[in-house]
Image (spheres, rainbow, N blue to C red):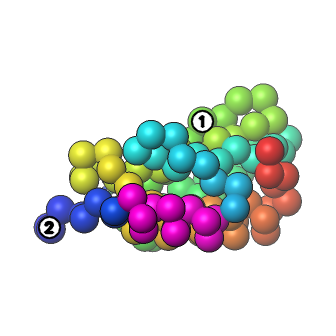
Amino acid sequence: MAVPEPLSEDTITERLAQLPGWTRDGNAITRTFAHTYHETLHLAMYVGAKAREVGHHPDIHITWQRIRFDITTHDAGDRLTRADFDLAAHIDNIAEKHGATPV
Ligand SMILES: C[C@H](O)[C@H](O)[C@H]1CNC2=NC(N)=NC(=O)C2=N1
């Protein structure tokens, strides 16, 4: 399979501007939501199902009433690609649908 192409800095800036709430952390993008501990577990499952569907997987960090998603493309040497931003948009939709509060 072809190696995914890392995005240019200009494109990263553009795509990030379309995803309010997501911030850059080096070569990853990250966003945290608040919910009950139980619901963060549900959210992880729903996002996991979407990740399986699209073939791109976020790192998921769950703590007390917080869930954080970190996304980068490992196949591109941990660089940002369009798949990262597409997945972030899916996560926003899922989080909103399930009543998670942006932090
Ligand atoms: C073959 C398969 O599509 C790849 O290994 C995918 C799976 N999910 C992935 N997820 C993420 N975040 N980065 C990847 O490089 C990646 N690669």
Quadrant of the drawing holding the C terminus: top right
> Which residues are drawn in magenta?
9-19
Q: Neighbour class for label 1 at 10 Å: few (<14), some, many (≥20)?
A: few
- Indicate the amino acid at tag 2: Met
Camera-nearest residue between 47 and 81: 81
| Quadrant of residue 20 within the rendered picture | bottom right
Camera-nearest residue between 88 and 17: 17
Q: Position of residue 47 (x, y in %)?
A: 59, 58
Q: Which mark is residue 1?
A: 2
Q: Position of residue 12 (x, y in %)?
A: 45, 61
* Label 2 beta carbon less than 8 Å to ligand 1: yes
Left or right: 65, with 79 as reference point: right
Predominant secondary structure in magenta? helix
Left or right: 7, with 70 as reference point: left
In this picture, is 9 found above or below 26? below
Q: Earlier in the sequence, mark 1 or mark 2?
A: 2
Quadrant of the drawing holding the N terminus: bottom left
Q: Which quadrant of the picture is home to ligand 1?
A: bottom left
Residue extending farthest to the left is 1
Q: Secondary structure at mark 2?
A: loop
Residue 55 magenta-highlighted: no
**Which residue shows up at 78% across the image and 29% down it?**
64
Q: Position of residue 66 (x, y in %)?
A: 75, 37
Q: Dot 1 corresponds to which residue?
A: 61
**Which residue shows up at 63% across the image and 54% down it?**
22
